Amino acid sequence: MWTYPPRRILVAVDFGQASDRALRVAGELARAFDAAVSVVHAETFEAPPYFTREQVRAIEQQRRGARRQGLRYLTRHAAALVGGTVEALVSDLPPANAILDASRDRDLIVMGTHGRRGPARWWAGSVAERVAREARIPVLVVRAGDGRPEALFRSIAVIARRGTFDGAARRYAKGLAETFGGSYSRESATSLQEARMEEATLVVVAQPGTGASALMANAADRAVRSCERPVLLVPSV
């Protein structure tokens, strides 16, 4: 069961600008809430079916050495951007699976998205969308940017489908606004259009629990996919 304020934050890292931004934002949250930060990087490999057993063993040996080096680099890279100690994990699972698996016993996932589709990076919008739909804990999705991380919480809008319990989302928005000296909407909007997006620096979306309706899932997908503003998806509890 996740808690607020978050005490255990997970950041997904692909070494792109968006995940660097996520690391900086996670660092601000960790300092504000005295939280521990973990980071996960997905690195998968499947040997072609025509490889011999000897070739596969040789490649696996090389990968173990590269994995150790990669873990050291991941730890240094993440710690520098978070501004503190991190626990690092390199996973063999596909990206979304790696993030969801590592999110067990965590209170918050922070992740970056490029807001586009395509195979150029594993960190495409579809990964963020799947994690946002399937995670059982809050998910904060950000894009690359140079602004100060704490400015992200200056003006917070809340969106909830009619009939969806939005108490957890509003409490989260209120807590972030009070912690970082910002403001939040005390009434939940029912769409991105109603959320006064021109003023919002963060949009908090109230997510139904497991088995969410297609309507709300689609609304969350649209919010993550467009991501003109950072989006925090908070499950109903």
Image (tube, grey):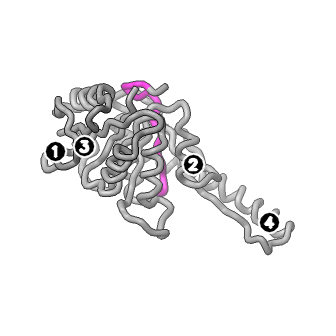
The amino acid type, in three-letter code, at marker 3 is Leu
The amino acid type, in three-letter code, at marker 4 is Val
Q: Is residue 110 magenta?
A: no
Residue carrying label 4:
56
Mark 4 secondary-structure assignment: helix
The answer to which of marks 1 and 3 sits earlier in the sequence is 1
Mark 2 secondary-structure assignment: helix
**Residue under the image location 17 percent in, 29 percent down:** 186
Nearer to us: label 1 or label 3: 1
Q: Is residue 26 left or right of residue 211?
A: left
Q: From where the camera sits, is residue 95 visible?
A: yes
* Spot occupied by residue 172 in the image (x, y as percentages of width and height): 30, 29
Tag 1 and tag 3, C-beta contact below 8 Å: no
The answer to which of marks 1 and 4 sits earlier in the sequence is 4
Mark 3 secondary-structure assignment: strand
Mark 1 secondary-structure assignment: helix
Residue carrying label 1:
194
Examine the residues drawn in magenta and state their main secondary structure.
loop
